[in-house]
């Protein structure tokens, strides 16, 4: 096991050549930065002994998963975890078992279920909150009875994530409940909009978020980073999205940035982004 002193895209392939790992794990924004330098390091990649790539901590865009597999020639395994579960909760299995872009896989550690607003467990295919229970799940937060009352229902820990379990037990996340956009009563998954916009050849990175609206409460907005040398306007991206999304899901505002704000672990920040970008009125 080799732990780097922190992520650095400029040093990644030097470390990769020195360590010759059989697999590496990173968050999606790091994978994208690595792909940005992969064309300059094809010989290093070919000389490696990589067996798989793991992605966790945030949703991996299907387009990034496909590009990683093409560039490195190994399967990309998306997983799902959180601190309260001693990290891993679900993971896509290795070949020959199937793995699916946009899915975080099957239960891998605790039990995983979907719970409705009333605390009842929902059947396969139903949309609700992801809940977990098991020996690796925390028994509670220290000295915080209010958080414990909110977080546990009938012995299940409420993750705060929204998702769907299919008949085969594969989990698909649709977003954090607090990040779901409520546009005049219409609930919109920002991940769905992200995935559509990422299909545009000029788009390298995107994060969809809620923007305040005086009548609707919230409106759909997106921050976009373009690929090097690419050029596209707001109207063109909106037209592109409108072919693939219902009208109420199409971003009414698209902001072009050189870099999208990230948290300490490299996750793109949706909450508070409208305020940071001055889109509050």
Image: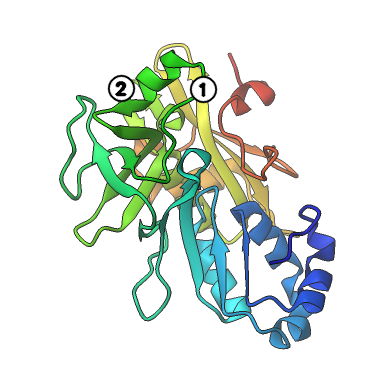
Q: Position of residue 58 (x, y in %)?
A: 53, 48
Res. 233 image quadrant:
top right
Say if residue 123 shows up in the picture: yes
Horizontal side, residue 165 vs residue 139: left or right: left
**Cβ–Cβ under 8 Å for marks 1 and 2:** no
Choose between 36 and 127: the one closer to the eye: 127
Choose between 109 and 173: the one closer to the eye: 109
Vertical order, 214 against 229 (above or below): above
Say if residue 240 shows up in the picture: no
Q: Residue at x 20, y 49 (%)?
A: 125
Q: Residue at x 17, y 32 (%)?
A: 120
The residue pinned by badge 2 equals 185
- How was the colour assigned to the protein in this rendering? rainbow
Q: Position of residue 182 (x, y in %)?
A: 38, 25
Vertical order, 155 against 196 (above or below): above
Horizontal side, residue 186 vs residue 85: left or right: left
Determine whether the residue tagged by mark 2 lies in a helix, strand or loop.
loop
Crowd tier of the residue under label 2, counting other residues whose Cα lies within 10 Å: few below 14, some 14–19, many 20 or above = few
Q: Which numbered circle lies on residue 142?
A: 1
Number of labels in the image equals: 2
Q: Which numbered circle lies on residue 98?
A: none
Crowd tier of the residue under label 1, counting other residues whose Cα lies within 10 Å: few below 14, some 14–19, many 20 or above = few
Res. 151 image quadrant:
top left
Tell me which label, 1 or 2, sits earlier in the chain: 1
| Mark 1 vs mark 2, CA separation in Å | 36 Å
């Amino acid at each position: 096991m080799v732990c780097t002193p922190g992520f650095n895209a400029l040093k990644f392939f030097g470390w990769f050549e020195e360590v010759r790992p059989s697999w590496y794990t990173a968050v999606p924004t790091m994978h994208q930065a690595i792909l940005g330098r992969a064309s300059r390091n094809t010989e290093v990649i070919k000389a490696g002994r990589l067996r798989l790539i793991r992605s966790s901590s945030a949703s991996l865009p299907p387009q990034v998963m496909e590009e990683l597999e093409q560039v490195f020639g190994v399967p990309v395994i998306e997983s799902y975890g959180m601190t309260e579960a001693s990290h891993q909760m679900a993971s896509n299995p290795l070949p020959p078992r199937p793995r699916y872009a946009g899915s975080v896989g099957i239960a891998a550690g605790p039990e995983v279920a979907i719970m409705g607003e009333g605390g009842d467990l929902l059947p396969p295919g139903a949309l609700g909150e992801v809940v977990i229970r098991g020996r690796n799940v925390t028994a509670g937060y220290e000295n915080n009875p209010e958080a414990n009352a909110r977080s546990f229902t009938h012995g299940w820990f409420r993750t705060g994530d929204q998702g769907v379990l299919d008949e085969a037990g594969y989990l698909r996340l649709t977003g954090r409940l607090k990040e779901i956009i409520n546009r005049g009563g219409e609930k919109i998954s920002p991940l769905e909009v992200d995935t559509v916009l990422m299909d545009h050849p000029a788009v390298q990175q995107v994060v969809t978020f809620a923007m305040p609206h005086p009548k609707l409460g919230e409106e759909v907005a997106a921050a976009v980073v373009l690929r090097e040398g690419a050029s596209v306007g707001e109207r063109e991206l909106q037209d592109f999205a409108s072919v693939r999304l219902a009208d109420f899901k199409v971003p009414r505002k698209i902001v072009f940035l050189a870099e999208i704000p990230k948290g300490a672990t490299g996750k793109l920040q949706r909450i508070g982004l409208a305020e940071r970008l001055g889109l509050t009125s």
